[in-house]
Image (tube, rainbow, N blue to C red):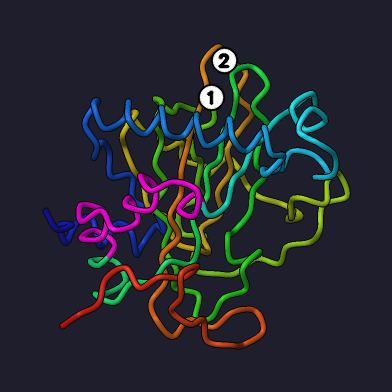
Amino acid sequence: MPLSQEQLDFFWANGYLNYGKLFTDEEVEAFRAEYDEVFRQAVEGNAFRNIAIDDGGDSQHKLKAPKQMLQITQMCERSIRFRKLLYEPRILDLVQDLIGPNLMLFHDQALSKPARTGGAVSWHQDNGYWRCRPANLVSCWMTFDDAVKENGAMQVIPGSHLKPVWHERSAETNALLKIEAVDDSKAVVCDVPAGGIMFHHCQTLHYTQPNETDRPRRAFAIHFMPPGTRDRKGETMRVDFKHPLLRASV
């Protein structure tokens, strides 16, 4: 089902849209099993990051840190199930309503906050990292666990997509950028059920707090861009295995 005009107006006024549940419970269980298996293999091969800390060291160093914000980029290159997810019509139909009928992958990432030790992700705009232009990329953020504020649900500042914010390298960790000040009294918490999705613009300020609950928060994000998007070097990103064309108008 396409997005309603009310939903579209909300997204462009606020920079995000909490869509709600998309996947069935059976689909969620299959995603969880695959997600956990990919992370198991990643830990075995030290092929993941803990972005809560300076990212050096082996798997045990990363997992024994006081906080773990575990990241795997390009899950689609490690799992057929997650590769197929990039082409999921239920998602692409909605993204098409937001940024048009020609859609490429910028990248995907799994972001896991383990129970009790899951680390925060500080306030940032995605394009503060990416520096893409034009800045019209859209992210689909989904969770395979019920996500609420206490275990790391997405928090956003409505309307912040309308102005880029300068980011600087964090003094606490080389893995994160930071910005000087965010009025978090304006933050909106986007509770998302297991199997649910939300969308946000690449300039929407967002944050997730530490997970100090007894249950995990397994999230996955797909970042979409229109063909013709330029990278931080000013070069047009080409269609290839890393950046596949996911949908094209006829």
> Quick check: 148 above or below 9?
above
Q: Residue furthest left?
A: 1
Q: Amino acid at mark 2?
A: Thr
Q: Amino acid at mark 1?
A: Asn
Quadrant for the C terminus, please: bottom left
The foreground one among 205 and 109 is 109
Residue at screen point 45% across, 26% down: 148
Where does the image place residue 216, in percent across and percent down from the top left? 52, 22
User: Are the residues flagged by discs 2 and 1 in contact, CB closer than 8 Å?
Assistant: yes
> Quick check: 177 above or below 207?
below
Q: Is residue 175 magenta?
A: no
Instruction: Write the start and end of the magenta stretch as one range.
Output: 75-95
Pointer 2 or 1: first along the chain: 1
Where does the image place residue 198, in percent across and percent down from the top left? 36, 46
Where on the picture, by quarter, is residue 119?
top right
Where does the image place residue 95, in percent across and percent down from the top left? 29, 62
Q: Is residue 82 magenta?
A: yes
The foreground one among 32 and 126 is 32
Where on the picture, by quarter, is residue 208?
top right
Q: Which mark is residue 31?
A: none
Residue at screen point 58% across, 43% down: 207
Where does the image place residue 83, in percent across and percent down from the top left? 38, 53
Q: Label 1: few (<14), some or many (≥20) within 10 Å?
A: many
Separation of disc 2 and disc 1 at Cα? Answer: 6 Å
Give SS at disc 2.
Answer: loop
Residue at screen point 24% across, 75% down: 101
The foreground one among 179 and 234 is 234
Q: Which mark is residue 213?
A: 2
Q: Which residue is mark 1?
A: 151
The foreground one among 76 and 89 is 76
